[in-house]
Amino acid sequence: MTASDNLDVTRCFGTGSPIYESYHDEEWGVPIHDDRHLFELLILEGAQAGLSWETILKRRETYRAAFDNFEIEKVAKYGSDKIAALLHDEGIIRNKLKVNAAIKNANVALDIQKEFGSLDAYFWAFVPGSKPLQPDFNSMSEVPPGDTKESIATSKDLNKRGMTFVGPTITYAFMQSAGMTNDHQTTCPRHQACKDMA
């Protein structure tokens, strides 16, 4: 199913916004195991703090260009000149704390890769059996606000390692984006499709 298919489907969210529909129909809840992609999602979820996800989706391509396609090694080496350029880039959220967090988090991500072999191995170890959680929610009102035991444990460990903008709510949104939990409601056409990917 893509956003252009059946506009009468019962989506969990996003109906009425082409970019949001596409994200819901093609990305949200799909298990991600690529380190670069996981890092991208983590940084974008942090950038979203206080904003709507749609705001970030509209800027995602600009973010990719500005942050060297989220290549962790490159982002980790950003210095003052690059930071200044990012803070003047109107295509991203020009928040100094969030920009600095992306660089700091890239350095922590490199340490995690050294310790665990990959971000994939690290993040997926926080869900039982390293498989997506399948809560089978009947409505979006059943989806927790971000304080699940998995998101709290992940957030706590990331903070302990020195990451920022990774509180439990942001971490849970990351887990949803990365397909670590299949929070599509059972009436959503994507629910079973994402379940089958587990």
Image: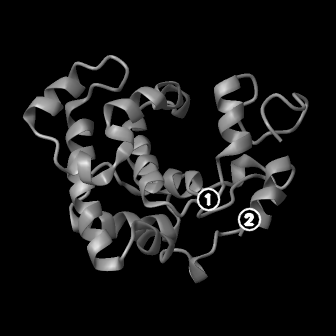
Q: Mark 1 is on which residue type?
A: Gly
Q: Mark 2 is on which residue type?
A: Met
Secondary structure at badge 2 equals helix
Counting other residues with Cα less than 10 Å from the Cα at mark 1, is it few (<14), some (14-19), or many (20 or more)?
many
Asked whether residue 196 is in view, the answer is yes
Q: Residue at x 65, y 46 (%)?
A: 27
Tell me if residue 150 comes above or below residue 172 in the rendering. Answer: below
Q: Which of the 4 image quadrants contains residue 66?
A: top left
Q: Residue at x 65, y 69 (%)?
A: 133
Say which label, 2 or 1, has the lower sequence index.
1
- Give the position of the C terminus as an image quadrant: bottom right
Tell me if residue 1 comes above or below residue 154 in the rendering. Answer: above
Left/right placement of residue 196 relative to residue 148 reads right
Disc 2, disc 1: CB below 8 Å?
A: yes
- Tell me the tag on residue 179: 1
Q: Which of the 4 image quadrants contains residue 6?
A: top right
- Give the position of the N terminus as an image quadrant: top right
- Tell me the tag on residue 50: none
- Mark in the foreground, 2 or 1: 2
- Tell me the tag on residue 197: 2
Left/right placement of residue 153 relative to residue 194 reads left
Tell me if residue 198 comes above or below residue 81 in the rendering. Answer: below
Asked whether residue 188 is in view, the answer is no
Q: How was the colour assigned to the protein in this rendering?
A: one colour
Counting other residues with Cα less than 10 Å from the Cα at mark 2, is it few (<14), some (14-19), or many (20 or more)?
few
Camera-nearest residue between 55 and 61: 61
x, y percent for residue 178: 56, 56
